[in-house]
Amino acid sequence: MSRKNKKLVILLLLIVAVIVVVPVVALPGAEFGGSDDAGSEMVTEVTGQEYEPWYTPVLEQALGGELPGELESLLFCLQTGIGVGVIAFFMGRMVERKKQEAKKAE
């Protein structure tokens, strides 16, 4: 890894750390909840009526009840891992394509 790339990686890691730490420090006592909860609360606030979902998730119908939290987390992590894998695959292909084009140009 070249010196320039090392500096770039360190800079990006510092930016990520700042993005993670600043909201926690700047907003003490803030609640960081999910968008589902925030959306249903906003609907209740605007309409004055309790929000009722208009569908039931497929897995909840198949299992006859709500998914356990551990299974829900596992499925979310699996989905995230697949997404990261797809993105990394295509980024790797672009890097390799760039290297091949540089070799052909020489």
Image: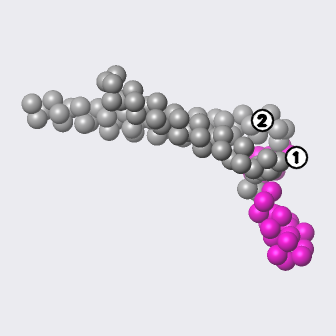
Q: Quadrant of residue 55?
A: bottom right
Residue 94 as seen in the image, left or right of residue 25: left
Q: Is residue 52 within the magenta segment?
A: yes
Q: Quadrant of the C terminus?
A: top left
Q: Secondary structure at mark 1?
A: loop
Say whether disc 1 or disc 2 marks the residue closer to the N-terminus: 1
**Residue in the picture at 83% in, 64% down:** 41
Q: Residue furthest bottom?
A: 47
* Front-most of residues 51 and 44: 44
Residue assigned mark 1: 65
Residue assigned mark 2: 71
- The magenta-colored residue range is 37-66
**Residue in the picture at 46% in, 40% down:** 87
Label 2: how many residues lie within 10 Å, few (<14), some (14-19) or many (20+)? few
Q: Residue furthest top?
A: 1
Q: Position of residue 61 (x, y in %)?
A: 81, 50
* Front-most of residues 51 and 105: 105
Q: Position of residue 49 (x, y in %)?
A: 90, 74
Q: Is residue 78 within the magenta segment?
A: no
